[in-house]
Image (tube, coloured by chain):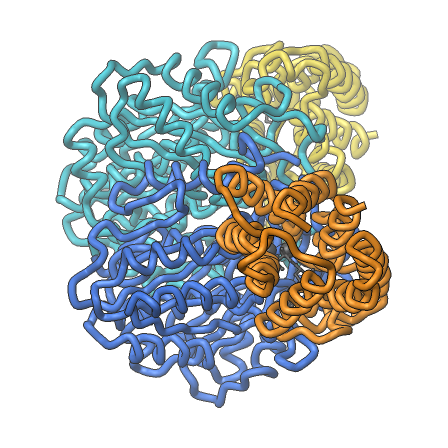
Chain colours: A orange, B blue, C cyan, D yellow
């Protein structure tokens, strides 16, 4: 992945969350507060604008800038979580090279997951971002030897599966946890946007 | 969706423009979404700041002024404010004596305020945080993100703001706020869902003869759905939940808030207050002070919440202290 | 129908029980439906009394107290009070200096207050009546019962109450109230109908993309139905109607009320206030004072009204005078 | 008509407005404020109770007591109007005889109409009580020679016709006048309750 591809990834995420904003908001309406779609649309639109006005030299720069923008534009739970994730991913990448390979990106994605879990204290099964992000990173790492395209595809598929599996979960973190057992039967909005992010990565790398 | 708005994405900023026009004694930064007391930072005084998603008006912007908040940071509708915004407000109200953040216990609010506190700390500003989690409809267990912050926030802000006005330290102001929170419990019931401008339709569908019991203030469904019942029985269920979670010994004094969620008219809130007061009286609780009205709302939701705060003489003294804000004003 | 009530026929009395419990500084006669200042009759002072159907809370009971009303007489929901009740309240606030009745111009209110005034006159009590008819949605012609009394009532009650506090005569107090009325104009728009407890269903059906323009405060349909439009255009239509009916010369000062009809949240009212203030500014009107909130409501109707009162220095001075009532409080 | 019959009339009106309360409220909902039914139900129920606790000696006493009770229990427009009407009717009846004949009642009803018009300033065609009351009195007077039963029947029929004719009228008095031309097409609630009052008279005298 080079700087141009990293940019394309964020542009693609922005397009995806914009297109799916209503869907994400609907999901959040069922077990949350109906703002997830509009939050991410605002955040990634701002990230794309921020990148346009900047001249990042490395993939890490692109992702740190994205994360910083998300933190300062999104708010809610998703802003700090995704913002911190992208910042951690960016910071974990080599600072001295303008391209990164699949193994490096895999390790960085893992650092992002760790940052999300450190900040939000969610574990797998809590019906959160982690339930899509965790399987995606694992699949990415496993397929890293086959190259970026294959790894990204595998991650996206694993994220999709993790996302779908959240439907049956009883939420223990975030707003959905207030619903207790009534959270069961609804797919988690955050896990869904995580899938969109990995799907975008697969799309731009294929 | 029927609302008096122009553009769902501009609601918060346009409402802030109205706040700015209506209250020349507040400084409103519409772009950054910050409402500040005109005379902030007040020399020697701890700054008291709160914020959260919009849609709960008059909370928090309506409580900015002498004797209560120095600043409020409204986020987008039902979305917590962002760290930059909170930091800017923290800087605006810091007179060197530190700043107290009053934060309702939601994952997003907690994380964003914490990030802002860290940034402020980097600049040498002492930040103390009061976490409000009074909603006893949610159990505080590993199965949840903890209890939500709702109606008690008004009492926390009033008491903390009054104490700050006396020149107390940030730690003392935060401790008083936390004490109010610990001694408070709230419970809410909704008759209808609310509609966020972004979603454009109600968050849930409630049949004509059903109510949502144990709702929050973000339009989410409650803990359970029940048949509509007379106000007397709803009041009883509410008071039971409150006293069950935070028992008050007979003879205790309390501040009681019967709060509308935005779409319920005052005549119903007074009717409910009559029921609640009678129930508390029966339980041996003396209502020393009360508020009846729309203070912590959930957009246009028809519903109500009851908050009971056990009040000691210090809390009552601070409650009674002068306050001059758009939504709460007395003694001045 | 979803309301926090027990029995449609008992709503007013049960809400009054809540008012009595919440405000120990008011004397509430629940059976007779009378709310009186605890210290009434105030020696030497003209009594100021208002009333009308219930369902408009906080009007009028929420405006009883120092500097505003001495008594309020709430009738049944949307039904004017009866002469006996008005007479009893008139007696309760008469300290020998006479009593001013503030009456909204509705056939029923006018007739019942007039009967009460005659009965009071028989007992030697001087009664002066201020008729409030500020709603410019209705033309004042032989084709109507005249303009309705709506939002301006709050300003009339505040100004008359403040003047009465200075020891002015009944005639002077009534004249000041009438002057406020003459200098005021209001206009209202509804997004939804309201539901009276007795009817149990909305007074009219409004499609999801339509509004009622020129509504009153009794749930009746308005002058016409229009397509839903952005808040900016609704505000413009409202301000145009007001300035069209009662033009203000450039440079005039005004008291402006952006009022919710019961089911509209504060965030929308502030947004509207921003629009209204900008329009008035453009018209050269200086908004000297404002109120934004739910003051004259129509049960749970989603809607708003704007009132513009041309204010001279005397009106502003009386507006600013101390007031301590459940719904309006400052300077004390 | 004697005292017992006068009482029956009021009891019959009370039963009718109670039974038709929802209907009257519906009519008032369309062009008014949805309280006419509940107002009259409350008022006539109170009148019946007041008469039970009293010992009126003349028909006039019964009707004055009824009117006084309506004034103090109904409120709104209907309270003063019907209250004043019944008081005026009662006062216009002979004070020295316990029974009244059709001619006397006709004259008294006319006095009631005059009182309503004096208080409310409505003229025929304004879409009010007057539009049913006016034709009813005229018909009553015209049939008075045929006796009370016939007169009351004629009055009820005329009231019904007057009531139905209000549908096409543009209101010029009361709340419905605020609607302007939108008041056309709805039957007036007050004219409808006036019909119920004359219908009750016809029922108890037949
Ligand atoms: N502690 C947490 N750790 C990880 N993800 C979380 C946590 N809390 C909430 N989330 C995710 O955030 C999503 C909601 O995001 P969003 O709607 O933008 O914020 P908010 O809940 O503040 O309205 C949830 O669907 C969930 O996936
Ligand atoms: N000036 C008037 N003269 C005669 N009848 C009137 C007048 N104004 C109103 N009415 C009658 O009163 C009826 C409404 O009564 P009601 O609903 O009880 O009172 P309100 O209009 O005060 O709610 C109308 O339908 C009309 O027939
Ligand atoms: Mg959300
Ligand atoms: Mg949110
Ligand atoms: Mg009425
Ligand atoms: Mg009516």
Compared with D147, D24 (above or below) is below
* Residue C128 coordinates in the image, percent (x, y): 27, 33
Q: Residue at x 69, y 35 (%)?
A: D25
Q: Is residue C288 left or right of residue B32?
A: left
* Residue A32 coordinates in the image, percent (x, y): 68, 58
| Foreground residue among C224 and A44 | A44
Residue farthest toward the front in the current orientation of the protein? A97
Query: From this viewpoint, is residue D12 visible?
Result: yes
Residue farthest toward the bottom in the current orientation of the protein? B249
* Quadrant assignment for the N terminus of chain B: top right
> How many numbered badges does the structure rendering display?
0
Q: Residue at x 40, y 61 (%)?
A: B50
* Residue D119 coordinates in the image, percent (x, y): 47, 23
| Foreground residue among B248 and C181 | B248
Q: Quadrant of residue B6?
A: top right
Q: Residue at x 43, y 31 (%)?
A: C150
Q: Residue at x 53, y 53 (%)?
A: A61
| Foreground residue among A175 and C89 | A175
Q: Is residue B47 left or right of residue B298?
A: left
Compared with B177, B330 (above or below) is above
Q: Quadrant of residue B191?
A: bottom right
Q: Quadrant of ligand 1?
A: bottom right
Q: Is residue B90 left or right of residue D47?
A: left
* Quadrant assignment for the C terminus of chain B: bottom left
Query: From this viewpoint, is residue B262 visible?
Result: no
* Residue B137 coordinates in the image, percent (x, y): 63, 72
């Amino acid at each position: 992945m080079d700087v141009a591809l990293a940019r394309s990834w964020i542009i693609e995420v922005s397009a995806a969350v914009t297109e799916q904003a209503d869907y994400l908001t609907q999901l959040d309406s069922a077990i949350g507060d109906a703002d997830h779609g509009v939050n991410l649309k605002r955040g990634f639109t701002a990230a794309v604008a921020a990148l346009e006005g900047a001249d990042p030299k490395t993939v890490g720069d692109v992702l740190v800038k994205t994360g910083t923008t998300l933190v300062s534009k999104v708010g809610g739970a998703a802003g700090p979580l995704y913002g911190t994730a992208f910042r951690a991913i960016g910071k974990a990448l080599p600072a001295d090279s303008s391209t990164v390979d699949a193994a490096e990106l895999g390790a960085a994605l893992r650092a992002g997951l760790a940052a999300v879990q450190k900040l939000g204290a969610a574990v797998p099964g809590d019906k959160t971002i982690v339930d899509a992000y965790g399987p995606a990173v694992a699949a990415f790492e496993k397929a890293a030897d086959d190259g970026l395209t294959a790894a990204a595809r595998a991650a996206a598929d694993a994220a999709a599966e993790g996302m779908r599996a959240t439907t049956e979960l009883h939420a223990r973190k975030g707003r959905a946890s207030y619903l207790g057992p009534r959270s069961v039967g609804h797919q988690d909005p955050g896990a869904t946007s995580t899938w969109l992010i990995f799907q975008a990565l697969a799309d731009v790398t294929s | 969706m029927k609302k008096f708005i122009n553009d769902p994405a501009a609601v918060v900023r346009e409402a802030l423009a109205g706040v700015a026009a209506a209250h020349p004694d507040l400084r409103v930064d519409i772009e950054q979404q910050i409402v500040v007391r005109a005379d902030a930072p007040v020399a020697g005084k701890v700054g008291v700041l709160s914020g959260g998603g919009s849609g709960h008006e008059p909370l928090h912007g309506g409580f900015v002024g002498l004797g209560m908040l120095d600043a409020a940071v409204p986020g987008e509708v039902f979305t917590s404010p962002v760290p930059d915004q909170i930091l800017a407000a923290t800087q605006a109200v810091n007179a060197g004596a530190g700043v107290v953040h009053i934060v309702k216990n939601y994952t997003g609010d907690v994380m964003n305020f914490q990030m802002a506190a860290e940034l402020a700390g980097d600049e040498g500003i002492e930040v103390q945080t009061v976490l409000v989690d009074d909603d006893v409809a949610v159990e505080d267990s590993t199965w949840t993100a903890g209890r939500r912050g709702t109606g008690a926030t008004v009492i926390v802000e009033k008491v903390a703001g009054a104490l700050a006005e006396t020149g107390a330290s940030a730690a003392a102001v935060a401790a008083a706020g936390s004490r109010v929170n610990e001694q408070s419990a709230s419970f809410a019931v909704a008759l209808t869902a609310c509609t966020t401008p972004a979603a454009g339709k109600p968050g849930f569908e409630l049949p004509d003869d059903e109510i949502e019991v144990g709702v929050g203030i973000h339009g989410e469904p409650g803990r359970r759905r029940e048949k509509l019942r007379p106000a007397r029985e709803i009041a009883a269920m509410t008071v039971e939940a409150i006293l069950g979670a935070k028992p008050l010994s007979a003879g205790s004094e309390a501040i009681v808030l019967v709060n509308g969620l935005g779409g319920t008219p005052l005549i119903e809130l007074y009717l409910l207050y009559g029921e609640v007061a009678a129930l508390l009286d029966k339980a041996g609780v003396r209502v020393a002070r009360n508020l009846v009205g729309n203070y912590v709302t959930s957009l246009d939701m028809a519903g109500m919440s009851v908050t009971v705060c056990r009040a000691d003489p210090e809390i009552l003294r601070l409650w009674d202290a002068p306050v001059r804000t758009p939504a709460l004003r007395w003694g001045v």
